[in-house]
């Protein structure tokens, strides 16, 4: 009989059983617990330190933090090893441990090490959350965006009617944002898990608007546009001039981009003018994101091996940071495309200097497509990734494949190289067909 009257054939320590590791059964502390600095107990024993802690980690009141939110809701808690707490139940397994190869063990070690002291998504929902300010980036000149500038310099209105033109492909990505969000609950710059918990009201309204607008009929169009008008006014009244936390600042930009793309590309003159009038507000809100943004200045200097050895603190924090980076670039691009359609020159644009600085983001479909922490860290360890600076894709073109490209990257690769060229690249490197 084990301590406390619980019958068990368990010989390994409690921490090794719960984390499914091979225990060397050393007394008083096994090798794994010594390495991890866990409290080592055997046979289902509990002490004051390990009670309520699935890995036996000593806890004090100062170390208690709110559990990181999960995609399954607040009631589905994760234990210290990143697995559902329901799996922590001791079912009295015999003393048998699964063989684990050293590579996988090292991989799991790195995951557990990263998540043990990770700030949760809730940090981004505090009004006084501290985000590292973005350093002043290197100033660029017109030739630095030569591939992208040619799209603007060579633009002619007829190109929008040619599906093989670079500008038509990119513009279509923005025209169909509402349908993409309604169908996938995500866009090329807004991850589907970004607002799983504590979804801001403006995101719920924007999503509802996308569903309504996508499915409008002649009979319902008037009512749908009335709701659109009310939603825009509500967003401007509730999200302007108030103290917002980082997540709310990102959410208001996401909501406004939805409303802007609907109104800009609907074809209705009044809607188009209303959207044009609100461009300055969207720019101002997007400027706030630049203050929050981690522009990857340090990671951009690393080679592939060094980058792989510097995983982010948590998947949730990476999702937020990457969504900020992509949203900022998408917002600048939307404004540039609209100015192009309106025939505005650089002298007419409120802030033409936005493109004078390096804007970075991560190119990796494997990282962006991950839907949980395990898949994300596995992709970080095993799959290729690139830090794109100022739309320089040279390294990716030399070493990447079609399967590495997500929708956000594809838009800017098409703008840089052309739609037919990217079709050939994706098919020859991965047998991937793009439309």
Image (spheres, rainbow, N blue to C red):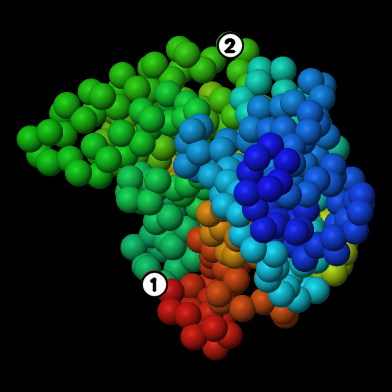
Few, some or many residues within 10 Å of mark 2 (<14, 14–19, 20+): few
Few, some or many residues within 10 Å of mark 1 (<14, 14–19, 20+): few
Q: Position of residue 387 (x, y in %)?
A: 74, 60
Q: Quadrant of residue 299?
A: bottom right
Q: Which mark is residue 435?
A: 1
Q: Is residue 77 visible?
A: yes
Q: Residue at x 78, y 49 (%)?
A: 42
Query: In the image shown, does 116 or 261 lie closer to the viewer?
Result: 116
Left or right position of 285 against 234: right
Q: Quadrant of residue 3?
A: top right
Outermost residue toward the bottom in this view: 428
Outermost residue toward the left in this view: 219
Query: In the image shown, does 74 or 222 lie closer to the viewer?
Result: 74
Q: Residue at x 51, y 17 (%)?
A: 239
Left or right position of 375 against 163: right
Q: Position of residue 281 (x, y in %)?
A: 54, 24
Query: In the image shown, does 22 or 322 lie closer to the viewer?
Result: 22
Label 1: which secondary element: loop
Outermost residue toward the front in this view: 1
Residue matched to label 2 = 242
């Amino acid at each position: 009989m084990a301590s406390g009257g619980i019958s068990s054939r368990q010989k390994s320590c409690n921490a090794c059983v719960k984390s499914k590791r091979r225990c060397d059964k050393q007394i008083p502390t096994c090798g794994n617990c010594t390495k991890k600095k866990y409290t080592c107990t055997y046979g289902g024993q509990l002490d004051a330190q390990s009670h309520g802690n699935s890995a036996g980690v000593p806890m004090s009141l100062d170390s208690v933090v709110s559990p990181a939110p999960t995609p399954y809701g607040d009631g589905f808690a994760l234990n210290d090893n990143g697995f559902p707490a329901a799996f922590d139940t001791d079912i009295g397994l015999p003393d048998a441990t699964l063989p684990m190869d050293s590579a996988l063990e090292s991989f799991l070690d790195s995951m557990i090490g990263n998540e043990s002291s990770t700030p949760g998504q809730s940090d981004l929902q505090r009004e006084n959350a501290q985000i590292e300010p973005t350093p002043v980036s290197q100033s660029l000149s017109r030739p630095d965006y030569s591939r992208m500038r040619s799209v603007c310099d060579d633009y002619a209105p007829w190109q929008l009617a040619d599906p093989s033109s670079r500008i038509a492909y990119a513009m279509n990505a923005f025209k169909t944002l509402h349908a993409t969000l309604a169908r996938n609950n995500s866009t090329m710059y807004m991850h589907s898990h970004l607002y799983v918990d504590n979804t801001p009201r403006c995101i719920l309204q924007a999503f509802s608007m996308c569903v309504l607008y996508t499915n409008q009929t002649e009979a319902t169009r008037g009512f749908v546009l009335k709701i659109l008008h009310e939603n825009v006014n509500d967003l401007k009244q509730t999200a302007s001039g108030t103290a917002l936390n980082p997540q709310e600042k990102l959410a208001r930009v996401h909501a406004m981009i939805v409303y802007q793309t609907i109104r800009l590309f609907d074809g209705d003159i009044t809607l188009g003018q209303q959207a044009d009038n609100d461009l300055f507000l969207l720019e101002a809100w997007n400027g706030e994101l630049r203050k929050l943004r981690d522009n990857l200045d340090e990671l951009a200097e690393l080679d592939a091996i060094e980058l792989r050895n510097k995983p982010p603190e948590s998947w949730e924090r990476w999702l937020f940071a990457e969504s900020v980076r992509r949203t900022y670039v998408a917002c600048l691009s939307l404004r540039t495309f609209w100015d192009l359609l309106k025939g505005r020159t650089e002298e007419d644009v409120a802030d033409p200097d936005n493109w004078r600085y390096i804007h970075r983001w991560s190119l990796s479909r494997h990282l962006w497509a991950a839907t949980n922490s395990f898949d994300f860290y596995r992709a970080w360890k095993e799959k290729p990734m690139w830090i794109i600076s100022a739309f320089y894709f040279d390294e990716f073109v030399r070493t990447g494949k079609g399967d590495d490209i997500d929708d956000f990257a594809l838009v800017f690769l098409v703008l840089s190289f052309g739609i037919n060229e990217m079709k050939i690249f994706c098919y020859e490197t991965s047998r991937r067909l793009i439309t």
